[in-house]
Amino acid sequence: MHEDHEVSGEAREVDGNETDRQAMSMDDRETDRQEGMDDRETDRQAAGRELLLTLDRSGPLPIHEQMERSLREQIRSGRLRAGERLPSTRGLAATLGVSRGVVTEAYSQLAAEGYLLISQGAPVTVALTARSATPSPPPPSLLPQHAYDMRPTVPDLAAFPRDRWLRSLRASLRRSPLSAIGYPDPRGLPELRQALSGYLGRVRGAAADPEHMLICTGFAQGLSMACRAMASLGVQSIAVEDPGWHLSRLVAERSGMGTIPVPVDEQGIVVEALAATDASVALVTPAHQFPTGAVLSPSRRAELIEWAEAGERLILEDDYDGELHHGRAAVGALQGLAPERVLYAGSASKRLAPGLRIGWLLTPSWLSWQLTAEKAIEDSGSETLGQLALTDFLHRGELDRHLRKMRLTYAHRRAALLQSLRRRLPQAEPIGRPGGIFEPVRLPDGTDEAALIAAAAKRGVGVEGFSLYHFSDGAPQGLVLGYGGLSEASLERAVHLLAQAFAEFDNSAVQW
């Protein structure tokens, strides 16, 4: 009897569970029925506006992302207005022949972005705050746009090895630890500093120590940090080459330092004139002076190092294109002669592309911590993806390969420019040295440099004049013609247009 009682109790428990399941099943069916009725009502009310969703089921984008993009654009353009109802997830899924989860994912993402309103038991609607106007075009660039850009700082952007760079980026990302994309060492990735040190020692003759290397966002940031560091040590002014890069003066002055112009001749900066100033810091471009193209002579190099060591002074060496020495012998970095008296700066801007925004400093040991602190305070360290790619790029020998190619390319373009000037504009006298990506040319006395630049711009040719780079009065009239970013045929056309612009002031200028 006891056994029968237990069996009977178990049967009753089973019967009770079955009853509960039946009751729950009825509730679920009622809920589904009600939701279905609500969905049909929502779909009926939303039927007046067709969503026009076109899905590419074989495309690279997931279906839910395609839906997100299409709906987002329809809301932005105003086709779907604020407050308007959208089909239910069930109804839209049935219409499109996709799973309900796909529609739910798309709706949820747009709700997270603020485009849709989703709440339990209510239809999906376009948010009242969603933008419903035609998107405005992107703002214009602050940079001048010319069909023939002959600015002296523009390298051959079309020659940037995109595929090889992408290969390096992918490879370095695959093998890098997660910490590589966390907050970086403010000095830069150790792997890049190690690779760059080896490269600069081999190619530029630098005394490169990765412990005293700092990765920065291009040369301009490096110069800015150096000026602030020196100002904090009591330095009030910096000597700059005249003519020289005009932004150097602006960066120094913005950092609270004055600038002392020092003349440049065919042998580079005049060290005797520098020594006559009270400057304790000098910014120079010894490998290829900008914008004259002069190379600092051996005797001047010795004098400059002696000037720095005798008074415990500092040389800021801007080695912006040291490897682009086509048509002449390479010269090593000054830093290799006196690493404790020279702060060396280089960047990827002319070597690869300015948009990479990667630069590097080799710092004297006594200045390393000060500059590291400046970098840490300014931006906590440069972005790391480009650093990872450049590290692999260096290890593979890709930078050496690219620079060998570009030296040959730029040599041919310089020859094409000089030939075109002789044929079409002989009044412009080239005065530079081989190498780099620009050629300074002197114009006849009395030429209105500013008017010539404006006339050239009207014809689609962008050029810069001597006056931009001279800090003292009485600058000669001339242009600094960049040939790095134009093909040989484009250089021929650009010089022809430049000759036409010059002809506005001298009818004998055009050579047909």
Image (cartoon, rainbow, N blue to C red):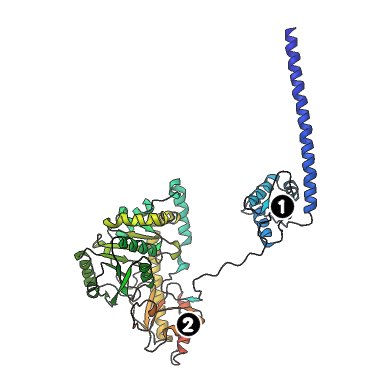
Q: How far apart are marks 1 and 2 (CA)?
A: 55 Å
Quadrant in which the N terminus is drawn:
top right
Q: Residue 454 carries which label?
A: 2
| Residue drawn 68% across the image and 62% down it | 77
- Closer to us: 70 or 162: 70
Instruction: Classify mark 2: residues with Cα within 10 Å, few (<14), some (14-19) or many (20+).
Output: some
Q: Is residue 437 left or right of residue 305?
A: right
Q: In this view, does 331 lie above or below 198?
A: below
Circle 2 sits in a helix, a strand or a loop, which is it? helix
Q: In this view, does 369 lie above or below 428?
A: above
Q: Is residue 181 visible?
A: yes
Instruction: Classify mark 1: residues with Cα within 10 Å, few (<14), some (14-19) or many (20+).
Output: many
Mark 1 and mark 2 residues within 8 Å of each other at the beta carbon: no
Q: Is residue 261 left or right of residue 2?
A: left
Mark toward the start of the polypeptide (1 vs 2): 1
The image quarter in which residue 435 lies: bottom left
Q: Is residue 197 visible?
A: no
Circle 1 sits in a helix, a strand or a loop, which is it? strand
Question: Disc 1 designates what residue?
Answer: 125
The image quarter in which residue 227 lies: bottom left
Mark 1 or 2, closer to the camera: 1
Where does the image place residue 50, in percent across and percent down from the top left? Answer: 76, 57
Where does the image place residue 133, in percent across and percent down from the top left? Answer: 67, 63
**Residue furthest bottom as drawn:** 507
User: What amino acid is labelled 1 in the image?
Assistant: Thr
Where does the image place residue 317, in percent across and percent down from the top left? Answer: 30, 66
The image quarter in which residue 187 lies: bottom left
